[in-house]
Image (cartoon, helix red, strand yellow):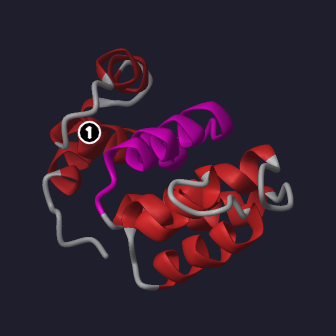
Amino acid sequence: MRVYQDLLIGNRIHPSPERAQVWLTKAASENHPRANYLIARGHLTGEGRSKDEDSYIMYLRRAARLNYPLAQKELGENYRMTREDDYGLYLALVWLLRAQKNGEDATPQIQAVESRLDRLDRKAAHKEASDFDFR
């Protein structure tokens, strides 16, 4: 990740965003959580990557599974905003709870999702969120 950042901003070297993306991809392939998150964001915004919703979700899930709190919160928010079914809301709650346990404040989002799920689904989501062996 250090090489990526140096190439991106030109820290002690000539900036090269293209080469920075190569290093970012390499870091992501080696399961670096933040690299996967940054690639996901790139696919969402089109910055340094092609805009691609499927790739965005794929890399966001990877980063979330690698226990990156920002990705966990963003994935939970994505489920909350795009899925109206109970299973989508269940997944939203699981990822938001994991983000919260990793120090990312998701209290308002958690409350919003919990208000839309029944007691058994809330209980199951809390149980699954406490299991960190989910890769």
* Relative to 103, 41 lies left or right: right
Look at the image and tell me whether residue 1 can be seen: no
Instruction: Please check the rendered image and state whether residue 31 is part of the magenta-colored stretch, yes or no.
Output: no
Residue placed under numbered mark 1 in the picture:
97
Is residue 39 depicted above or below 22 in this figure? Answer: above
* Relative to 134, 80 lies left or right: right
Dominant secondary structure of the residues highlighted in magenta in the image: helix
Q: Secondary structure at mark 1?
A: helix
What type is the residue that disc 1 sits on?
A: Leu
Marks counted in the figure total 1
Is residue 6 depicted above or below 125 in this figure? Answer: below
Q: Position of residue 93 (x, y in %)?
A: 36, 39
* Quadrant the C terminus occupies: bottom left
Label 1: how many residues lie within 10 Å, few (<14), some (14-19) or many (20+)? many
The quadrant in which residue 92 appears is: top left
Q: Which residue shows up at 34% across the image and 30% down it? A: 118
* Quadrant the N terminus occupies: bottom left
Is residue 117 depicted above or below 33 in this figure? Answer: above
Q: Which residues are magenta?
A: 67-92
Q: Which residue shows up at 39% across the image and 64% down it? A: 33
Q: Position of residue 61 (x, y in %)?
A: 50, 62
Q: Which residue shows up at 53% across the image and 46% down it? A: 88
* Relative to 133, 50 lies left or right: right
